Amino acid sequence: MNIISANKLSKTYNHKDGPVEAIRGISFNIEQGRFVTITGASGSGKSTLLLILAGLIRPSSGKFSFMDKELTDVPDAVLASFRRKHVGFIMQSFALIPYLTAIQNVMLPLSLNKMDKATQYTAAVSVLQQVGLENRMNHLPRELSAGQQQRVAIARALANNPSVIFADEPTGNLDPALSVEILDFLKEINLQKQITVVMVTHSPLAAGYGNIKIHLDNGQIDLISNENIP
């Protein structure tokens, strides 16, 4: 089953020096449970494509769907509901709220789904245990290492039991050893829970984790490989 389908997606930004075509005519399908890596030079359209697929920005033309549900022209409220129910995000900068503890950061997306506090807390403890941070759940971000902060971000992304995790340069601020630790954990989630991972990266090491590899050049797909490997 295709979890994500893109059909001739394009995005043009208006700029004072003239229109900028970030992506142009991109089409592909992603089956559920795959690990997708999106690579390309700076300015090739990687992050724009990721944001469109995650329902955070709209394409200028073309269509995209999630589990065969067309999302291109739906109201903003429908997109927001889609994100709350099905999507987890991991960012390069961790994007943790600095004055909230680890468990409070993880509970944040759960509160958006109108879950009671006791259920939020139980669910947040469970995912922090999964990432090995049950002993740090009352620590503020500044009291955690970079690797621990990224694991809190992963726990937050997992809190709603998403169908897909979108990751934008998740190892960009980590040293090589921590990068491998985070990538191995994402691959474990992908394999054990069959959560689809779509990851933008400039790192050849990180790109090697994908079984679908998409390379962009000047806003278009330059190469796509679909490997029949776990």
Image (cartoon, grey):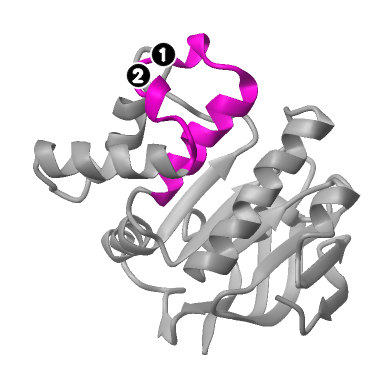
Please tell me whether mark 1 sits on a helix, a strand or a loop.
Answer: loop
Return the x and y of residue 44 as percentages of the image width and height.
Answer: 83, 54
Rendering quarter of residue 12:
bottom right
Closer-to-camera residue (112/25): 112
- Where, quadrant-wise, is the C terminus in this rendering? bottom right
Q: CA distance from mark 2 to mark 1?
A: 4 Å
List the residue tagged with mark 2: 101
Q: Is residue 104 left or right of residue 119?
A: right
User: Disc 2 vs disc 1: Cβ atoms closer than 8 Å?
Assistant: yes
Main secondary structure of the magenta stretch:
helix
The residue at the point 28 percent across, 61 percent down is 81
- Give the image quarter of residue 62: bottom right
Identify the residue shown where x is 65% and y is 58%: 187
Look at the picture and state if 111 lies above or below 74.
above
Residue at the (11%, 36%) spot, across then down = 117
Count of labels shown? 2
Q: Secondary structure at mark 2?
A: loop
Q: Which residues are magenta?
A: 131-158
Residue 150 is a magenta residue: yes
Q: Position of residue 72 (x, y in %)?
A: 46, 74
